[in-house]
Amino acid sequence: MYDFRLKVFYIVAKRLNFTRAAEELFISQPAVSKHIHEIEEHYGVKLFDRNGTKIKLTKAGNVLYSHVEKLTDIYRDIDMDIAALSSNSKGLLRIGASTTVAQYYLPKYMASFKERFPDIEMTMVSNNTEVVENLLIENKIDLAIVEGQSKRQNLQYNCIAKDEIVLCTKASNQSAKQIIKPEDLKKLPIILREPGSGSLEVIASALKTKNIQLSELQKEIEMQSTESIKTYLLHSDVYAFLSIHAIFRELKENELKIIDIKGLEIERSFYLAINHGDMHSLQELFFKHISL
């Protein structure tokens, strides 16, 4: 019932990128532009200012975004509250999550979902993306929330959120520069995640765009746990690539700092994955709850 054009505007306004919005909505970029143009024609205002490849919201765009954000929450609440009246809102939902997602992103959504649907039992297992996807394929879990760029042909992926991976070190690291060039990464001692990690996959892909291989980095140590990596960082002048979601507290308390890499931004999506054709009622409920 929600006007799809408003959903298109909402996603573009959040991402400030027509291409990414098109990918997330599974429509073409010209279709995104068409929907935005129709809204601008309807209200007789310009919603975005364009400067080359970059866009930003106009004053009218910000006003519309504020209202559409409220509408999005209202429609989501309608869907969930009506679903809560259904007899289908009972049962067991087995969730698998990749490490970063399980530690820093997913728990708050599970808590709010459980509050709304107290009769639905939930379990969660956590491991790296490769392992979690295998559990899903083996039907040992009902859905997976994963990071990375892995795309198994027998799984259906739905983008639910965006994340940024940043290079960081302890705030008191005197040798750390505020901005470095990509090639400077080869000189830094770096903690890396284990093979099979979705984070490592995204980092490797981003570095390849700058003609840098993981094997060229000075690997200090390999670790599976983000919390372990953060603790190591606090006790050594080394560096690590970590999700911005994972270091909010450390940045706020001035324990860690971000090192900007000139011309390199590492972005990724979090995906809800299911086996093709296997979206049952509980999976759909959780998907609606966690999606934008």
Image (cartoon, helix red, strand yellow):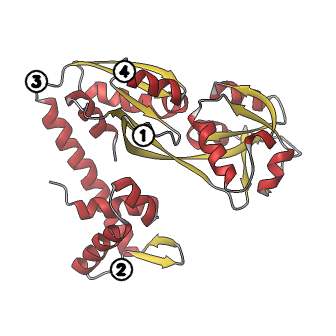
Along the polypeptide, which appears first: circle 1 or circle 2?
2
Q: Are marks 2 and 4 in contact (CB under 8 Å)?
A: no
Question: In the rendered image, which quarter contains the N terminus?
Answer: bottom left
Whether residue 160 is situated above or below residue 97 in the rendered picture: below
Is the residue marked by circle 3 packed among few (<14), some (14-19), or many (20+) residues within 10 Å?
Answer: few
Identify the residue at horizontal 28%, vertical 58% (top origin): 7
Along the polypeptide, which appears first: circle 2 or circle 4?
2
Is the residue marked by circle 2 packed among few (<14), some (14-19), or many (20+) residues within 10 Å?
Answer: some
* Residue under label 4: 141
* Residue under label 1: 271
Query: Picture coordinates of residue 42 (x, y %)?
Result: 22, 78
Tell me the CA gap for discs 3 and 1.
28 Å
Q: Quadrant of residue 242?
A: top right
Q: Amino acid at mark 1?
A: Tyr
Tell me the CA gap for discs 4 and 1.
15 Å
Query: Picture coordinates of residue 91 (x, y %)?
Result: 22, 17
- Horizontal side of residue 24 vs 55, given as left or right: left
Q: Secondary structure at mark 4?
A: loop
Which of 196/290 is in front? Answer: 196
* Residue under label 2: 46
Which is more foreground, mark 1 or mark 2? 1
Is the residue marked by circle 4 packed among few (<14), some (14-19), or many (20+) residues within 10 Å?
Answer: many
Identify the residue at horizontal 24%, vertical 33% (top origin): 285
Q: Amino acid at mark 4?
A: Ile
Query: Picture coordinates of residue 3 (x, y %)?
Result: 20, 60
Q: Amino acid at mark 2?
A: Lys
Which of 98/157 is in front? Answer: 157
Q: Which mark is residue 87?
A: 3
